[in-house]
């Protein structure tokens, strides 16, 4: 797939995306309700027509709190049919054992569900919200999507996360400045078994911190220890309220609470994998 960075293109990014989507008569869209999939939904509905787009959200224990409800609101606002399907990854040993290829196995199951829906509807294409930045990190789920024929229009258009936010602001989308989200399994070091109890602890801790005003936050699970990531400029605010924060997280089940001085960053668990930031084709 040839991908051009937005800065190298003279064509308006919205036009580039619409040209790609115009090649699809209809589509099922993997819809989390995040920044990327919200822009893709808006563009797909306007290009193909609302009645030709079906947004599908998978609901499971690994959804960040409130994600499914937000997806419902956004799909309703867009006037697009929305379907929520349940999946239980905790029944899959390839998921709960949490190997480096966990995301690959999970994504194959998720996309398999959505492809079944597409076939039942007589829809040829399944779209996801992968973008150009996603190629720079270890994301085996992208390999699974490619193997299953999933299309990534934002990636094909060369749109980065920054581009997507800028375009979302132009279009007045409510998700333009929404914090980045990821499934709760990404809070666990590879090899650490994922349990329902641990997922609940992480989710509750992040909800607590969000209510404290930390919009972009991750609580990484290291057994008895919680490692908090927030943007580096917000680390002092964690220290000011450290007694309340550590007290709450200890009530949730953690024994030790620590702050990551490097701050929030996507894929921090991938730092434990040698040569993690390589082309996803090799994983």
Image (tube, helix red, strand yellow):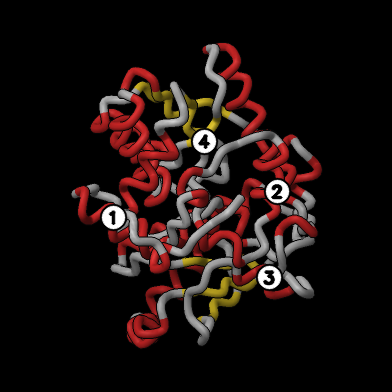
Whichever of labels 3 and 2 marks the residue nearer the N terminus, that label is 2
Label 3 or label 4, whichever comes before in sequence order:
4
Give the foreground label among 1 and 3. 1
Looking at the rendered structure, the secondary structure element under dot 4 is strand
For mark 1, give the secondary structure. Answer: helix
Which mark identifies residue 277? 3
Q: Residues within 10 Å of mark 1 (few under 14, many from 20)?
A: some
Residue 48 vs 154, above or below: the answer is above
Mark toward the start of the polypeptide (1 vs 3)? 1
- Residue that badge 1 annotates: 167
Task: Give the spatial CA distance, label 1 vs label 3.
Answer: 27 Å
Q: Which residue is mark 2?
A: 143
Residue at image location 42% in from the left, 24% down from the top: 54
Discs 3, 4 touching: Cβ within 8 Å: no
Do we see residue 112 in this rendering? yes
The residue carrying pointer 3 sits among few (fewer than 14), some (14 to 19) or many (20 or more) residues within 10 Å by Cα, namely some
User: Answer yes or no: do the residues labelled 1 and 3 have beta carbons within 8 Å?
Assistant: no
Q: Which residue is mark 4?
A: 127
In the rendered structure, which disc, 1 or 4, sits on the residue that comes first in sequence? 4
Quadrant where the C terminus sits is bottom right
């Amino acid at each position: 797939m040839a991908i051009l960075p937005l800065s190298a293109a003279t064509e308006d990014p919205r036009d580039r995306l619409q040209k790609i989507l115009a090649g699809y008569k209809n589509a099922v869209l993997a819809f989390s309700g995040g920044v990327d999939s919200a822009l893709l939904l808006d563009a797909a509905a306007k290009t193909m027509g609302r009645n030709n787009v079906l947004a599908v959200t998978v609901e499971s224990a690994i959804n960040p709190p409130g994600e499914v409800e937000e997806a419902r609101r956004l799909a309703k606002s867009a006037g697009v049919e929305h379907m929520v399907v349940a999946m239980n990854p905790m029944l899959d040993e390839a998921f709960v054992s949490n190997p480096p290829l966990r995301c690959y196995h999970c994504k194959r199951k998720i996309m398999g569900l959505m492809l079944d829906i597409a076939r039942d509807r007589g829809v040829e294409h399944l779209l996801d919200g992968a973008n150009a930045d996603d190629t720079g990190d270890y994301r085996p789920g992208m390999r699974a999507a490619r193997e299953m024929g999933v299309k990534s229009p934002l990636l094909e258009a060369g749109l980065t996360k920054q581009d997507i936010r800028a375009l979302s602001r132009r279009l007045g989308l409510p998700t333009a400045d929404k914090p980045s989200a990821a499934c709760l399994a990404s809070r666990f070091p590879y090899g650490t078994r994922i349990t329902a109890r641990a997922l609940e602890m992480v989710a509750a801790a992040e909800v607590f911190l969000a209510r404290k005003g930390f919009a972009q936050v991750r609580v990484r699970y290291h057994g008895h220890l919680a490692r908090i990531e927030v943007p580096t400029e917000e680390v002092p605010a964690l220290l000011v309220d450290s007694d309340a924060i550590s007290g709450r997280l200890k009530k949730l089940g953690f024994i030790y609470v620590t702050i990551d001085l490097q701050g929030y960053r996507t894929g921090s668990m991938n730092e434990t994998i040698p040569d993690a930031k390589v082309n996803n084709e090799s994983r």
